[in-house]
Amino acid sequence: MKVISVRNQPEMVDSAISYIQSKWASEQSMAVYQDCISHSISTPSVLPRWYILMDQGSIIGCAGLITNDFISRMDLYPWICAIYVEKSYRGQNLGRLLIEAAIADAKEGGFDNCYLCTDHVGYYEKFGFSNIGIGFHPWGETSSIYQISTQRNI
């Protein structure tokens, strides 16, 4: 298994866009992912970053590191987002590889913490994330907000 940063391997951008859209986009948000991911490979900015998890040439997972994950706490960033591992690969601690890649890039970019929003209570705590409260989404839902120090090894 290998995590690939799309920024570091821009030849993977089209495959990454297709995969991430298939896991996270609705009909209305396809362009959001395409635009964000395609521009991430050439920006001089630290963010955004997108990752794909590969197994023998096949994409089996993904994640991102972005400025905001459609949540009210815009004072917090960067956000680890769009974490996904194919069902047949779950239970092998592969989500950790994606999280580690995002945290390492955040640390290298000068950030002290990373955040994520989720309703998966109990999963991220295993990696050392702390629940710091609730955030509000534009579509009316809430999510728990988690924080982890970029200095922490997970």
Image (cartoon, grey):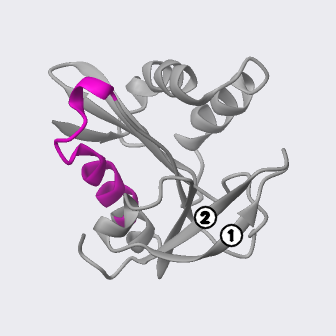
58 w.r.t. 90: above or below: above
Residue type at tag 1: Ile
Magenta-tinted stretch? 86-103
Q: Secondary structure at mark 1?
A: strand
Residue 122 lies, in percent from the top left, at 39, 62
Left or right, residue 77 beside residue 138: left
Question: In the depicted view, which residue is nearer to us: 87 or 108?
Answer: 87
Picture residue at 37% right of the left edge, 69% below the top: 125
Question: In the depicted view, which residue is nearer to us: 120 or 137?
Answer: 120
Picture residue at 74% right of the left edge, 70% below the top: 73
For residue 4, say whether it is visible.
Answer: yes
| Residue 94 among magenta residues | yes
Q: Secondary structure at mark 2?
A: strand
Residue 56 lies, in percent from the top left, at 14, 21
Q: Which numbered disc, 1 or 2, marks the residue that appears first in the sequence?
A: 1
Single out the residue that lies furthest toward the front. 122
Q: Residues within 10 Å of mark 2 (few under 14, many from 20)?
A: some
33 w.r.t. 135: above or below: above
Picture residue at 35% right of the left edge, 56% below the top: 99
Q: Which residue is mark 1?
A: 134
Q: Which residue is mark 2?
A: 144
Residue 60 lies, in percent from the top left, at 30, 27
Residue type at tag 2: Ser
Mark 1 in CB contact with mark 2 (< 8 angstroms):
yes
